[in-house]
Image (spheres, rainbow, N blue to C red):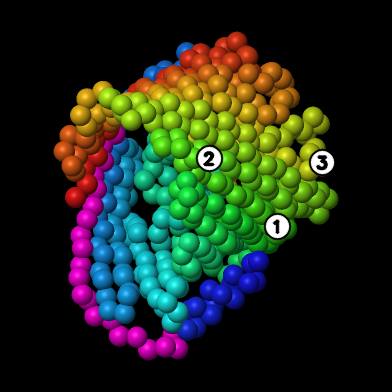
Amino acid sequence: MKKLLTGVCALSIAVLLAVPAFAEVQNIKVDGALGFKAFIRDNYEVVGFQDTDARDWYSNYAKVKFTADLTDNVTAVVGMFAERDWGSPTDGEAGNTFSCVPCYVSMKEMLYSPLTLNVGRMGLSIADALVIGDGSLTNSLIASDYSEATTFDTIHGILDYDPLKLIIGTAKISDQIQGSTDDVDLYFIDGIYTMEEYNAVLDTYLVNMHYSSPGEYTNEKGTKIQGLTGPSESSTQGLDVYTLATSLTMEPAEGLTTKLGIALQSGDYEKTATTTRDLNAYALDLGVNYAVDAEYSPNVGVKYIYRSGDKGCKTGVCTGDYKGWLPLYGDQSNGTIYDPNTNTNSICLTAGLVPVDRLDVGLEVWMYNLAKKQLDATATSTKTDAGMEIDLNAVYAYTEDVSMGLSFAWFMPGDYYKTGYDETATQVLAEIGIKF
């Protein structure tokens, strides 16, 4: 798969260089956004740890994007983006530096009418973002899970054969040392089939995460050090992780929406001179939501998520297949605080309504269980009851361009957490968003 996609991308670039094109600016659009957030968290740094001090802080982000429509169906997008915590030690010149995000070119009907080619740094989300949706690798924000920087460096083509759409491409995840073999690359094929009946969408995709052999590097003392890579960050050899998944969303009746998602992971988990562990994991998503056509626009729903887990290592030396689900660069939310993305077998009840004009209120009640029992540890036990979470949020559309939000979250640890580590964790978040 990697060789095929590499060849496709190389051919696309070669065609671009070989075929002359003349672009002229037809139109330029400018838009942007500002966001301000205020957090209060208690018992949060170590989930459920007794007597952890409450913490409060503020953060904000700014986005400006220029979209230039050129001739021959070419669009160039250049954006500036920055985010920071107020009063952070990195605030100042480093904290106020703008990044070129997004920054890409899109060419529609390139050589072939159904083909669109995108090249550059941009948002990339495959299906329901189970494994691909958040490209942020490092972030200096305290609440890094709320970062707005989620783009990928990608080259991908979109073939639109309505009602079938194919997306084929690659993304560079890591290239830390020029000339080294420690690269991490993403390759993907995504097929989306849309059916008018029941507004159904079937999305099937294959993702390959390739970790190149890390080789050796020399530290500041001149000593050669063996590099490490892979999901376990302990492999000394190159390896591949494959995810094959499909999801089906549909509206079988008016106001009723359903979702079914199944995913399998295989390939390599760890490779060293003495250890080889394969990957064998799976995930399942089920969801039903019913919106009532009545006053206050009420809706209710239920979600079930399963992510396989690994039993852990009894002696410190791990053997056999690794069975824990790898979220990779996913962007799903399974709760505000606990938010598990592996080893979970959980149910969520949801409800929402519009009590007054322009005010949306939502409620989620999560009941978390582990999919696989874990070994006894200092803070955790062999029990599977991970806990319960209640998330309440409200969003008010102050104007067409300004929104205000307020949310509360409580996570009550279950029997999985031992005494002294089972205090309720809380978060309060207030935010203002402006789009222009």
Q: Which of 219 and 278 is in front in this view?
A: 278
Left or right: 262 with respect to 66?
right
Q: Does the magenta stretch include residue 144?
A: no
Q: What's under tag 2, amino acid-wise?
A: Lys
The numbered disc on residue 220 is none
Q: What's under tag 1, amino acid-wise?
A: Leu
Residue 61 in the image: above or below residue 118: above
Q: What element carries label 3?
A: loop
Q: What's under tag 3, amino acid-wise?
A: Thr
Mark 1 / mark 2, whichever is N-terminal: 1
Residue 383 lies in what quarter of the image?
top right
Q: Position of residue 221 (x, y in %)?
A: 60, 55
The residue under label 2 is 259
Select label 3 or label 2 by which is in front.
Answer: 2
Residue at the (30%, 64%) spot, across then down: 78
Residue at the (19%, 43%) spot, across then down: 401
The residue under label 3 is 319
Whether label 1 touches label 2, CB < 8 Å: no
**Given the current orientation, which residue lies at the most extreme top position?**
419
Image quadrant containing the N terminus: bottom right
Q: Give the range drawn in magenta.
A: 16-38
Q: Position of residue 294 (x, y in %)?
A: 31, 26
Q: Where is residue 134 in the image (x, y as percent from the top left)?
A: 47, 48
Select label 1 or label 2 by which is in front.
Answer: 2
Q: Is mark 2 on a helix, strand or loop?
A: strand
The residue under label 1 is 239
Cα–Cα gap, marks 1 and 2: 32 Å
Q: Which of 18 and 197 is in front in this view?
A: 197
Cα–Cα gap, marks 3 and 1: 17 Å
**Majority SS type along the magenta span:** strand
Cα–Cα gap, marks 3 and 2: 36 Å
Q: Which of 47 and 104 is in front in this view?
A: 104
